[in-house]
Amino acid sequence: MASLGASALARMLEICTVTNYEARDILFREAEAAEYFYCVLTGYVRLYRLNKEGREADIRICGPGETFAECLLALGDNYLYNAQAAENITVARFELQKVRALAEQERDIAQAIIRNLSAHLRTTMECIANDRLQTAPQRVAHYLLDNCPQDSASASIRLPFQKSLLAGKLGLAPEALSRAFSSLRRAGVIVRGRIIQINDVSALKQI
Amino acid sequence: MASLGASALARMLEICTVTNYEARDILFREAEAAEYFYCVLTGYVRLYRLNKEGREADIRICGPGETFAECLLALGDNYLYNAQAAENITVARFELQKVRALAEQERDIAQAIIRNLSAHLRTTMECIANDRLQTAPQRVAHYLLDNCPQDSASASIRLPFQKSLLAGKLGLAPEALSRAFSSLRRAGVIVRGRIIQINDVSALKQI
DNA sequence: CGACCGCTTGACCAAGGTCAAGGAGTGTGG
DNA sequence: CCACACTCCTTGACCTTGGTCAAGCGGTCG
């Protein structure tokens, strides 16, 4: 929304509702009639699908500032996945109908939607490539490097959420994440709780 | 482009160039400076990435009517993947710069881009979900059902491309696709060359 | 006829999912 | 203050899935 002009911004804020959910609340389910798209303000949201045996697979983890269900803006009447609060969260929601109407009137809004969809499409394709090309330790290394402050030789990261959530985000079972972390120990990665110490950033890049 | 008004359509056609490529030609490579986005007219294009050992993984297979590299419209100066002609193809290409400019002027074009990006984002997220939830035979069954004409009890499909391309599209090695097909024989799927005979559509849905 | 290409099949192996058991940390009640 | 429970994570054992390598098969083309 940072890119919107004053009037467009005002009109978006006008149709926006802020809501809280508690950990594990379901915001919506796959195939339900879609009314809103969402923007996370605080906390994390899990988007996931079920197969017919009931196993869950995460599709995306959304953090503060990220939107979801925006792909329904163009077309589509039903949600495509389940959305669950991973913790206590605050989200803003926008009625799809109204945003569609606004996008036709306000040029800024259409442009902002294009930027948003593009960025998502890019990260989503990136995710497919990573799933298909990388092993578990490589995915974890990749995630750590993406979240390293800079090209300093060493770094320390605090995970913003539970490890089980990270596992889902990377398309792994929690056990596999655990094993990936312990295999990264030899590359100088030390895990204690949510704190991850990286002694040698360049060694991590080799993986 | 079907949704564009006359003037918008004319302006798009104006900046469009039609090109042919031969099988295995590379249209562009990952990280190259991005100049165009593309629309396939005839044939199929493979979008893929490499890991550092040089293994390839397909991200998407684009057929007639589909576009690629549109995610660079909003932002981004470099291609994110490699694009290769899977056979002799004809594509239309559009200068990103010019389309960006047009999208700001012509409302239709911005709307069409939104629809296009939305649709891609949906299918791409769908792809992640399928990769993470389904086994090889399930993916193949899913593909066949998606390409069945209707809810007739039986059907016959002709693959529009080589099996090795389908394998890549489904995130499998060619050998795994072969095995998946042979495991579907017991569900009444008969493969001869590119022709696939499905005796019992509902049995396939159970898988 | 031989070469080549795409596909299939078999054998083997590695990655990671699943199940079960065992910590470690935190909060609760006695 | 300690015992207990609970949650989350880790570890080990096992097994399934699918990747890889190599050989063989069948069709097509020169």
Image (cartoon, coloured by chain):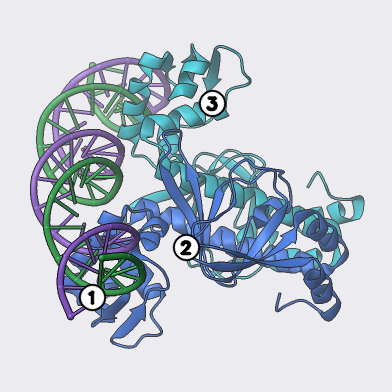
Chain colours: A blue, B cyan, C green, D purple
Q: Are marks 3 and 1 in contact (CB under 8 Å)?
A: no
Q: Is residue A8 visible?
A: yes
- According to the picture, the residue beneath numbered tag 1 turns out to be A189
Nearest to N terminus: mark 3 or mark 2: 2
Q: Nearer the viewer, residue D10 or A172?
A: D10
Provide the secondary structure element on which disc 2 rests: loop
Position of residue B168 in the picture relative to residue B149 (left or right)? left
- According to the picture, the residue beneath numbered tag 2 turns out to be B30
Q: Nearer the viewer, residue B166 or A97?
A: A97
Q: CA distance from mark 3 to mark 1?
A: 45 Å
Position of residue B147 in the picture relative to residue C20 (left or right)? right
Q: CA distance from mark 3 to mark 2?
A: 33 Å
The residue shown at (65%, 42%) is A32
Q: Total marks drawn? A: 3
- Circle 3 chain: B
- According to the picture, the residue beneath numbered tag 3 turns out to be B145
